[in-house]
Image (spheres, rainbow, N blue to C red):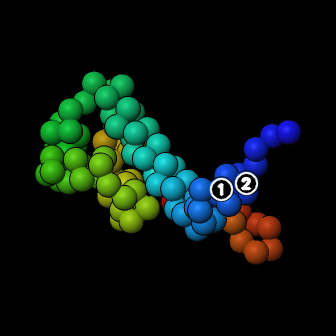
């Protein structure tokens, strides 16, 4: 018989909210890691990318070590364009339609 997540939570005293929060943190860390790796694959330093973006190196460092969910869309767009990428933002509407915002 397999050990379910519900059994683990019950045995360890972990709540569903704590599990969801940990999952969200891991996903955030994965997104930040992917951004850094994309920059590095283009052989760009943070300083070079900052110059491409028109921001300070500290701003790039903050973005790469921080909360991507709360970065301004314009900043993320400039970051991606600075490494040769593009940003696409999609919205799924209640009626099933998908709308491209950026």
**Residue at the spot x=31%, y=42% of the render?**
82
Q: Which residue is labeled 2 in the image?
A: 7
**Residue at the spot x=40%, y=39% of the render?**
33
Residue 49: mark in rendering: none
Q: Which residue is labeled 1 in the image?
A: 11
Contact between labelled residues 2 and 1, with CB atoms less than 8 Å apart: yes
- Position of residue 92 measured from the top left corner of the image (x, y, whole percent): 69, 66
- In the rendered view, would you say 100 is above or below 48? below
**Secondary structure found at label 1:** helix
Seen from the viewer's position, the closer of residues 18 and 12 is: 12
**Secondary structure found at label 2:** helix
Which part of the image, by quadrant, shows the N terminus? top right
Q: Is residue 41 found left or right of 57 in the rendered image?
A: right
Furthest toward the bottom, the residue is 94
- Position of residue 95 measured from the top left corner of the image (x, y, whole percent): 80, 74
Query: Picture quarter containing residue 46?
Result: top left
- In the rendered view, would you say 80 is above or below 100? above
Q: How many marks?
A: 2
- The answer to whether residue 102 is seen in the rendering is yes
**Residue at the spot x=59%, y=62% of the render?**
13
**Residue at the spot x=47%, y=43% of the render?**
30
- Position of residue 98 measured from the top left corner of the image (x, y, whole percent): 71, 63
- Position of residue 20 measured from the top left corner of the image (x, y, whole percent): 58, 61
Furthest toward the right, the residue is 1
- The answer to whether residue 20 is seen in the rendering is no
Q: Is residue 58 found left or right of 95 in the rendered image?
A: left
């Amino acid at each position: 018989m397999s050990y379910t997540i519900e059994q683990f939570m019950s045995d360890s005293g972990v709540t569903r909210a704590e599990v969801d929060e940990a999952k969200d943190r891991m996903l955030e860390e994965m997104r930040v890691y992917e951004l850094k790796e994309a920059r590095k694959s283009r052989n760009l330093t943070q300083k070079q990318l900052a110059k491409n973006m028109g921001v300070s190196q500290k701003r790039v460092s903050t973005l790469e070590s921080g909360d991507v969910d709360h970065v301004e869309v314009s900043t993320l767009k400039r970051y991606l364009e600075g490494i040769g990428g593009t940003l696409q933002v999609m919205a799924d509407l209640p009626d099933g339609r998908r709308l491209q915002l950026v």
